[in-house]
Amino acid sequence: MTFGRITIVLTVILAIFLAFIYYLPAMPWFLPTAAVDEAQGIDDLLRLMMVVGGGLYIFIQGFLLYFVWLYRRKPEDGEDAVGRALHGDNRLEIAWTVAPALFIVVLTVLSLRELDKLGLNEPREGARVIVVTGQQFAWTFAYPETGITEVNTLTLQKDVPVTFNITAVDVTHAFWIPNFRIKQDATPGFTLSVTMTPNKVGEFPFRCAEFCGAGHSSMLAKVNVLEEAEYLVWQETKLAGGGPGADANPEEIAAYGLELYTAQGCGACHALEAGGTSGAVGPTHNGLGTTAEQRVEAADYTGSATTAEEYLRESLREPGAHIVEGFPPAMPPYGEDKLPEGDLNALVQMLLQQK
Amino acid sequence: MVGHIVTFVQHLQAHARQLPRLGRAGSAFLLALLLVMVGTGQALAQAPEGTANANPTLTTMLGITMGVLGVGLLTAVLISFVVWATGTRNPLIPTDEEMEHSFRRYFWFSVDHKVIGIQYFWTSLFFFFIGGLMALLVRWELAQPGLTFTPDQYNQFFTMHATIMIFLFIIPMLVGAFGNYAVPLMVGTFDMAFPKLNALSYWLVPPGALIIMAGFLAESGTAKAGWTSYPPVALQGGAGQMLWLLGVFVLGWSSIVGGMNFLVTIMNMRTKGVHYFRLPLFVWAIATTAVLAVLGTPSLAAAVTLQFMNIAFGFPFFDAAKGGNPLMWQHVFWFYSHPAVYIMILPAFGIVSEIIPVFSRKPLFGYRALVYATAGIGVLSFLVWAHHMFASAMFPWLRIPFMLTTMLIAVPTGIKIFNWLGTLAFGKIRLETPMLFSLALVSMFVIGGISGVFLGSVPVDLHLHDTYFVVAHIHYVLFGGSAFAIFGGIYYWFPKMFGRMLNESLGKIHFWLSFIGFNVAFLPMHAVGALGMPRRYADYDIAFTELNLTISIGAFLLGFAQLILIYNMLRAFQVGKVAPANPWNARTLEWLTTSPPPHYNFEEPLTVDHDPYDYGRRISSPEALPVPGD
C-alpha cells in the first residue's frame, strides 16, 4: 500500500521533471530563438538528449541516494559490520553494458541522420554566396554577386538560402550566430562552406567563438535578416555608395563618419569617447586630430605624409606605414573594396575633429 | 666560507673525475643540454614582445632572466641528477641515510618513493592554490559586464589557470603524489623499480613550473592563447608563449619518465601472491594512465617543439602565411591532450574504486569488469581526439568516425558507474569524508559524462562548441571528478602519509561547502553557454549578467572552502589524533604497515593470499588480516 503510493509519487515527480527538461530548450532563458530552418532539427536533438540524459541521471542518482540511505550503517550494526559478500553478477554486467550501448546507438544514429539532413557543407541550388573573412578583430562580409562589402554587419534576406564561404586572414576565428546554432572555424589557408536559410526577420548577435587574441570578446558583428523588399532597398542604398552627397556640410560628413566608425567596429580596438568605445588593442583615437598633427611635425618623423589628413588616410589604407610605438602591427589594411573613397573621407574628417 | 669554497672545488673535481664514467652518450647529452640552454636564452632575448619592437624594459629583462634561470635550474637539476645517480657523493649534501629522519630530505634527490610522493603532494597543493587564485581573478572580471582588468591580463589569467591546474595540480597530484606514495605500497614492495629515475621525474617539475611562471615577469606577460595554444594566435605570444612551450615540454618529460617507472614497477615488483587480478583498482588505473603518458606525451612534446621553433626561429610549421598548416597543431596537440583528460580522470576513478568498497564494507562489485572498463577507456582515448575539432577546418566527413568512437566511450564509463552502485547495494555504508567525496564524484561525474554525450553529437556540438557549456562540462569532469577524488584521496591517505588523522567535522564542512560552491559555480555555466556566451570572453552581453554573477559567487565560495582543507591539515600536524596503521579497516596492502611506513615500507617481504577487497569474509578486525611473511 505505502509502497504503491511512493511509486506513484515518484513517477509523477519524474514525469514533471522530464517534462520540464523537455521544454527547457524551448524557453528563452535556455536557448536563443532559432532563426534558421536548420536550427529546428538541432534543437529537437538537444531536447531528446536532455530527456534521455536527464532520465538517466535521475535513475542513477535515485539509486545512489536510495542505496546510501537504505544500506547506511545503523547504530545497532556495530563497528566491524560488513556487507554481503557479493563479488559481481555477469547478467547485470551484460545488462548495464548493453542498455547504455543501445541508448548510445540510437542517439548516434539520430545524430547522423540529422547531420545528413542538414547537408551543411553541400552546395545548394539557389543559395546566395557570401564570403565571410575574419581578421583581428573584425568580420568582413563580401557579396560577390553585387560587389557589396560590409564590415561587422551581415545583411540577409529571409527565406533565401545563403552559402557562407568562411575564411580568415591572420589567426583562427569562428563564425557563430547563436540564433543560427551552426558554428564554423575561420582558419587562414582554409575556406569552409556552410549553407543555412534564415527564416526570422530581426537583428541577431554574431560572436567570434574561437579565441583570437586580446580583442576576442569585442569581435562582435550584427546580423540583419530582412524581408525581400527591405533587402532590395538595402542593396540599392549600398550600391549607390551611401553616405551624404558631395554638397553636404562638414557636420553631416563627420556625423556619417562617426556612424561608419561604430558600424565598422573600429571601437573593438580603439578608444573614442564620441563613439562610446574603449578598445585598448590599438592606440586611442581621443584627440587624434591633435596627435596626428604633432606626429607629422615631430623631429624624428620619417613618413611621406605631410599633413595630418594625409597621415590618417595612409594609416587606414596602409596601416603598416605608421605604427605607433608600443602597439602591435595588427591593424588590417582598408582598401577601396572595404572602404570606398567617400567613406574614407568621412572617417578621416571625423577623426580630424577629435581635438 | 673559505672552507665551503674548498669543499665545493673538491666536489667539482670529484665531478670531473666522474665524467669519463658518463661515456660518450652522457657527455653528448650534457653538451646538447648546454646548447639548448644557450639557444633558448638567445631565442628568448630576441623574442618579439608582442609590441612593436619597443626597447626591452626592466620587466622584460627580468622575465627573460627568470626564464633563462629556469632553464639554468633545469640544467643544474639534470647535471646534479646525473652526478647523484652515478653515485658521486656531494660532500655538501648529507647522504640519504643521514637525512633519514630529517626534514631536509624533502629538498634533495631521494630514492624513497614516499619522500617523492610527499614532495609531489605539497608542490601540487601549492599550485592548486595558485591556479585557484587565477580562477578567482577570472571570475572577478566576469562577475559584472565591463572590464576590470585589460583583456590581455584576463587572457593570461585563464591560460595560466588551466595550465597550472592541469600540468601542475591534477596530473602531479594524482599520478605523482598518490601514484608514487600508494602504488609500491599497494603492490607490497619496498620502492619503485627505478628509484633514481623517480627522483628525476619529480625534480623536473620545479624547473618546468619556474619556466612557465617566469612569464609573469615578462613585459608582454605569460602565455595568453589558452592552454590549447592554438596557432596562429599563439605565435603572436612572444616570450611568455615560448616560456610556456618550454615549461610544458619539461613537465611532459617528467610524465614520460614517471610513466615508464610505474609500468615497470607494476609489472615486475608485485610481491608474492599479488597477481594481476589482485591489483587494487587504483594500481590498474595508474598502469593505464602510465601507458597513456608514455604513448601520448611524446606527441605533445613534438607539438610544443614545433611551435617553439616556429616562434623562435621562424619555421613555417603552423603559419599559414608562410605555407604552414594551423590545423596540424590541433591534431598533434589533441592526440596527446584527449588521452590527457583520461590521465586526469582514470586515477580519480581508481581512488573512488578504493574508497567505495572500504566504506561500504563490501567487495568491489564486478572487479574484472572495472579493470576491463579502465583498459577499454585507455584504448578508446587514443581514437577520439578530433571530437575537439568538429567545428574546425578539417574535412567535414571526418566528424563521423570521431563521433562514433566518442559515443562508444560512454559504454565503459557507464560500466564503472553501475559497478560502484552495485558495490553500495547491500553494504554497511559509513559516511566519512573520503566516502562523501567519492559519492559526490559518482554523482557529479555523471553530469559531466552526460553533457559529454551532448558534445559528442556533431549537430548539437556545432551549437555548444567553444561556449560556456564546454567549460561547464570540463569542470564537472575535472573538478566534480578529479578534484573531488583528490580531496577524497587526501582524507583517505593523509593518515598513512603523515601519521595523523584529519578532523572529521572540518572535513564534512569542507565537503559540503565545496559541493554547494561547485554546483552554484558550474551548473549555470551550462545555461549561459547554451544561451550564447562563448568561452574565453573577457566581457559579455549584459543579458548574461545574472548568471555570471551567480557563477562568480559560487566560485568564491568554492575557493573559500579550500582554505578549510589547509586549516585541517595544519591543525592535524599540531593536535591531530595519531593515526593507527589501519584507521579505515581497509584490506589493501598499504594498511599492513605503520603510518607512516618505515623506509623500506614493510618489515619483511609480504606473501598475500587474499583479494584486495574481500570484506565479505566477515573478518575485518586488523588482527585477522593476513600476517606479513609466510
Image (cartoon, rainbow, N blue to C red):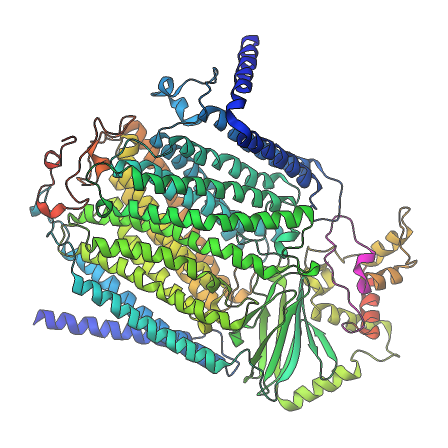
Q: What is the quadrant of residue B453 in the picture?
A: bottom left
Q: Position of residue A66 (x, y in %)?
A: 18, 60
Count up the numbered dots. Answer: 0
Which residue is drawn at the image coordinates 68% and 36% (left, top)? B61
Residue bounds of the magenta highlight: A316-338
Is A206 placed left or right of A310 in the picture? left
Is A319 placed left or right of B77 in the picture? right
Q: Nearer the viewer, residue A283 or B114?
A: B114
Q: Position of residue A69 (x, y in %)?
A: 17, 56
Which residue is drawn at the image coordinates 21% and 27% (left, top)? B604
Q: What is the quadrant of residue A223 in the picture?
A: bottom right
Q: Is residue A274 magenta?
A: no
Outermost residue on the right side: it is: A306
Is B428 placed left or right of B65 in the picture? left
Q: Position of residue B71 (x, y in %)?
A: 58, 35
Q: Is residue B529 visible?
A: yes
Indicate the quadrant containing the N terminus of chain B: top left, top right, bottom left or bottom right: top right
Indicate the quadrant containing the C terminus of chain B: top left, top right, bottom left or bottom right: top left
Q: Is residue A319 magenta?
A: yes
Which residue is drawn at the image coordinates 80% and 64% (left, top)? A316
What secondary structure is the magenta-colored segment mainly?
loop
Q: Position of residue A202 (x, y in %)?
A: 58, 81
B283 versus A351 height, above or below: above
